[in-house]
Image: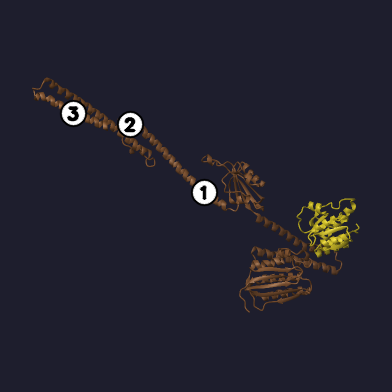
Chain colours: A brown, B yellow
Amino acid sequence: MSRIRTISTATRISLMMCALGALLVAMPIVLPCLPISLKFMPWIIAVLGLLASCCGGLLAWILKDQQRQSETTESFLHRISHLDYCDVDADQIEGNLPPVPNNHPLLKPLRSIEKRFAKNFEILRDAEHSRAVLDIRCRRATMQHEQITKVLSNLNEAVLVVDDYDELIIANSSAGHLFGFDANSTEHRALTQLVKCERLLDLLAESRSLKSASTRTDEIQISNDEGKSLWYSVTASSIEPDEEPEDSLDQMGRGAVAVLRDISTQKAAQKRNAVFVSAVSHEMKTPLSSIKAYVELLADGEAEDEKTREEFLDVINTQADRLRRLIDNLLNLARIEAGVVQVNKENTSLNELLEEAFHVLEPSAAAKSITLVSDLSQLYLRVYVDRDMMLQAAINLLSNAIKYTPPEGRVVIRSRLDDKQVKFEVEDSGVGLSEEDREKVFDKFYRVKKNSQMASGTGLGLPLAKHIVTDVHQGQLDVRSQLGVGSTFAITLPSVGQMS
Amino acid sequence: MTREAKILLCDDEYPILRAAEFKLKRAGYEVICGNDGQEAWERIQEACPDLLVTDYQMPRMNGLELCKCVRSLPRARDLPIIMLTAKGFELSIDDIRRDYGVTRLLSKPFSPRELLQLVDDTLEQINQSEGSNASEVNDIIPTKQAEVMP
């Protein structure tokens, strides 16, 4: 700009010289007396001035044009460098730039720059779009991962996932607790370093090795980190790799997953069941053996006299009764345990019920010369019970006491109100129980070995009484005993209001 | 066959003991009884019988414990033992033969005829074999497979 100003100034000066020259040219005409030398000098000055002004004007015009072009270029570059690909589409770039005249010397490079910018804008937009898509996928994957992690961490079952190199890639907290490792560690570790159970390792390896998707199940015993041996049901499945992974990072390879469910309780129940079935079988075969033996003796005519025949028939009858009682007790127990027994509770007098039990067992006591004493409360003890069941429980306790009390002994049945609870007890002067027997006396079929000669029994009377009192009536049945002195079985029932 | 042998019967179930005793006595055997393993062991120590028939599940000393005691007694080492049982064994049959020296097993409920047949067979086998191991075992005889004597 300063150059153009200089040139403009020079042009002005030239024009002034031209004007001066023209004046001097006019002077001889106006003033004919001037010398000749003075007549030509003005012409020269005027011509020179004219020439200078023409040159100056031309130069100024050229420079101004150049300046205009430079301004256009500068404006163009400034504008294009400030365009944001987020705000302007590639095809809108041209509209956001200053126009470039067709005669601009830098037209081609500027257009080239414009095109390059347009292309780059497209690329940037595509990249931005891809980034947004990846961001969404990443968030979704993170959310899914968090959900899965939460689900896995809340599972009681242990879950282990291995890749095709047998490295552990996922494990939940249950698995960590079972095998004693940190399930939250993100480091990939060889499974064999963490799990010492050979069968589990084999199951996973088998699942992975098969060509098609497969599932293996087994029951295995594992010692947990506390050294306790537990039973687990294991399901091991192969994990098929993606057939069309979206990218190479999705290609997991052939992995496997194992889910371990603790079945120790079920196993223990199965074992108890097996023991129970075995015990029931034995208990049933015993009277059956007698029945079969005596029937055969009679059929073979072995009983040659009437007395022997009577004896054999009596044994058959007694053993048949024994079998029936056993079956009845088993059924009652099973019904109570299954919760399907019909319970008819009603308000009833406990003392009346106990008196009835007393009368039922009086003959048995008399046969052994046992003193049977009734010491019942003067109060009216009202209880809300199934009368038949509670009567059965009382009879079982009394019967038990009489069986295991030697002749000439004493059995007392008493009732009382104790701190708003109704209690009744059966106390005997029998053989008593050891500490060990006291703990087991309510187990099914348990009979104190050394006392089994004193009386026959199914070993179900006390368990049945216990179930009736605790499961059906929410009461308590306890025993106090001293070996060689006697036992006291006590039942406590909730009170429903008493009267004197 | 002559039945001059002395048989020790051992069972805590009196009716079964009585039935077996009745059958064997009527067959001609001399029979002594024990109500549990301990009692049987005391009787064996006093006078060793020719054959022991014992139940498995008994108070004070069960059948297997009794067999172990019997096998520890030099003069009873070859005593043939028939074990009666209504309960499945926890051990295998081979273990019972090897570890307890049981000669034969008879499952309950059994018939007195089966028992007599088994006693006869066992004693005859012992008498016929010279220096044979009395604890050589034959099969467990479940009731339904036993041969019924006329």
Residue A419 locus on image (x, y percent): 63, 73
Secondary structure beneath dot 2 equals helix
Q: Which residue is mark 2?
A: A107
At a point 81% along the width and 65% down the height, the residue shown is: B14
Q: Is residue A418 left or right of residue B149?
A: left
At a point 78% along the width and 64% down the height, the residue shown is: A450
Q: Which residue is mark 1?
A: A144
Q: Using the rendered view, name the quadrant where residue B123 is placed.
A: bottom right
Which mark is in front, 1 or 3? 3
Q: Amino acid at mark 3?
A: Leu
Nearest the viewer among A2 and B26 is A2
Q: Mark 1, chain letter?
A: A
Q: CA distance from mark 2 to mark 3?
A: 36 Å
Q: Are marks 2 and 3 in contact (CB under 8 Å)?
A: no
| N-term-proximal mark, 1 vs 3 | 3
Residue A293 locus on image (x, y percent): 81, 62
Residue A301 locus on image (x, y percent): 85, 64
Q: Using the rendered view, name the quadrant where residue A490 is placed.
A: bottom right
Q: Is residue A135 left or right of residue B107?
A: left
Q: CA distance from mark 2 to mark 1?
A: 55 Å
Q: Which residue is mark 3?
A: A15
| N-term-proximal mark, 2 vs 1 | 2
| N-term-proximal mark, 2 vs 3 | 3
